[in-house]
Amino acid sequence: MRIRRRPWAKQELEEAKFYIDDPSINKDKWKESFENKKAPIYLEIGCGKGSFIAELASSHTEINYIAADMIEAMLGLSKRNIETIYKEKGLEINNLLLIRMNAERILDIFSSKDEIDRIYINFCNPWPRGKHKKRRLTHTRQLENYKQFLNKEKGEIYFKTDDDELFNESLEYFKESNFKIVKKTYDLYNDMIFEDIRTEHEEMFSSQGIKIKALIAKIN
């Protein structure tokens, strides 16, 4: 997604207590980074404008969340949306951290000690050209990285996309990486396999009549 520069984003992010610009300093100790150190941790890779993670995290305060993106302007919008939704619900932001991260360097941020219980990947770039497919967040190369820090017993990935080719090829990626597809659907709103909290992209695509594809995969 192309997004215009937000001159205010850098300062606002630096002032936000729940934002981490260099998350590598928390590697091996993400559990200690939250107020509730015993809660499971869920990670969204590519959080966009943050409405999905804000609604999800504010609805499940018993779980800790990390929302990651690499674009400063997008993170700035996420920060504002998170603050707005938590304020509307009268909640303190103590179970959600917003981080700046390039998914290509995810193993610089998380390790097996962190035991992430769930990863959300929502409407990632489909990278349709052959030579670019390795950049996909669901590509075998990335899935192997996720396995390094997902909880070995119950780690899972929730994936949503509007792109048919990406979804079908991702099914093969998960198989190649020894993930078990627990649930899948080619029409999420007729077969709601998980909680109905929608991203900005999702609202746009569904309003155009595009069916949303989704799956839940677990480490086999």
Image (cartoon, helix red, strand yellow):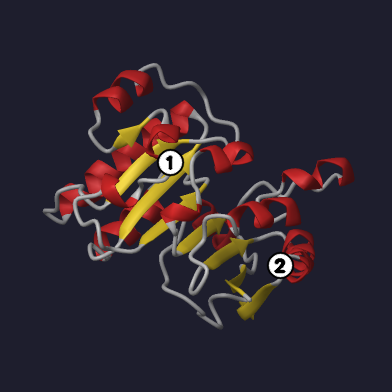
Foreground tag (2 vs 1) = 1
Judged from the image, the secondary structure of the residue bearing numbered disc 1 is loop
Q: Amino acid at mark 2?
A: Phe
Identify the image quadrant of the C terminus: bottom right
Vertical placement of 178 versus 201: above or below? Answer: below
C-alpha gap between disc 2 and disc 1:
25 Å
Residue 185 is at least partly visible in this image: no
- Where does the image place residue 117, in percent across and percent down from the top left? 44, 64
Which residue lies under the disc numbered 2?
174
Q: Quadrant of residue 212?
A: bottom right
- Where does the image place residue 48, in percent across and percent down from the top left? 48, 43
Which residue lies under the disc numbered 1?
27
Disc 2 and disc 1 in contact, CB within 8 angstroms = no
Front position in the image: 214 or 144: 144
- Where does the image place residue 140, in percent across and percent down from the top left? 74, 57
Residue located 79% across and 68% down the image: 172
Q: Amino acid at mark 1?
A: Lys
The mark nearer the N terminus, 2 or 1, is 1
